[in-house]
Amino acid sequence: MFYSITGNLVTTELNAAVVDNNGIAFYLNISAKTHEKLSPKLGEKVTLYTYLNVKEDGLDLFGFFSREELMAFRLLITISGVGPKAAMSILSQLTPEQFACAVGMGDTKAISKAPGVGPKTAARIVLELKDKVAKQLSVDTETDMAGRQELMSGKDVLSEAMNALLVLGYTRGEAANVLKTVDPALSLEDTITAALKKLMK
């Protein structure tokens, strides 16, 4: 229903923000990471990507500073036992890049550090999202396979970054093309960050 909302940032709380769009003030649930980005912009014009959660007793509007955070949220709530509250808890603990790294590397401890997310839930998140990535990688064309082999023959960082970008919703072709342009000496998180900047241009 809503893709994004643009307007003046009226106020922020740790888990919420109010954005005024032409006299209509929208109350959005946000993560701590989005709060960090928004706090210096009080009174300024901002854009938040949104997700409308429909419940039996009402509607909840969620706001995200980046499309990648929204992608991660959408992925998380598809997993059994992970609702919007748990998803926001995870995204308050981890940036989208860190979340993608954790899934790609099977780091359940990083995910379970989020309040309300236990080890079993973290393991389910890693298992289900890794499986999804594996399915995306299983359908190969000659072009995609060549790009994939080129990446896999380099540092492990590139293959992990490839998986992380797939987790965030990018195609194999998009990920392969952009990773070829990233400095191979970068760390995994820096590689993902650099790739995302190029993908968002």
Image (cartoon, rainbow, N blue to C red):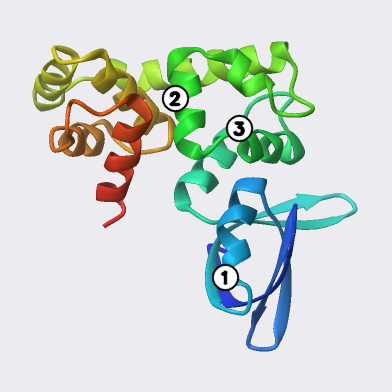
- Residue 1 appears in the picture as rendered: no
The residue type indicated by label 1 comes to Lys
Rendered view: 130 above or below 61:
above
Q: Which one is earlier in the sequence, the residue at label 2 or at label 1?
A: 1
Using residue 54 as the reference point, say whether residue 162 is left or right of it: left
Q: Residue at x 19, y 39 (%)?
A: 178
Q: Which one is earlier in the sequence, the residue at label 3 or at label 2?
A: 3
Q: Residue 135, image x and y in percent?
A: 38, 18
Q: Which residue is mark 2?
A: 101
In three-dimensional space, the C-alpha distance between marks 2 and 1, rounded to whole angstroms, equals: 28 Å
Q: Nearer the viewer, residue 36 or 23?
A: 36
Q: Which residue is mark 1?
A: 41
Q: Residue 164, image x and y in percent?
A: 39, 28
Q: Residue 44, image x and y in percent?
A: 56, 78
Q: Residue 199, image x and y in percent?
A: 27, 48
Element under disc 3: helix
Residue 16's image quarter?
bottom right
The residue type indicated by label 3 comes to Leu
Q: Nearer the viewer, residue 14 or 198?
A: 14
* Tag of residue 90: none
The residue type indicated by label 2 comes to Cys
- Residue 74 appears in the picture as rendered: yes
Using residue 98 as the reference point, say whether residue 142 is left or right of it: left
Q: Which residue is mark 3?
A: 76
Q: Nearer the viewer, residue 52 or 179?
A: 179
Rendered view: 110 above or below 178:
above
Q: Residue at x 46, y 51 (%)?
A: 67
Rendered view: 22 above or below 29:
below
* Mark toward the viewer: 3 or 2: 2
Element under disc 2: helix
Residue 196's image quarter?
top left
Rendered view: 199 above or below 45:
above
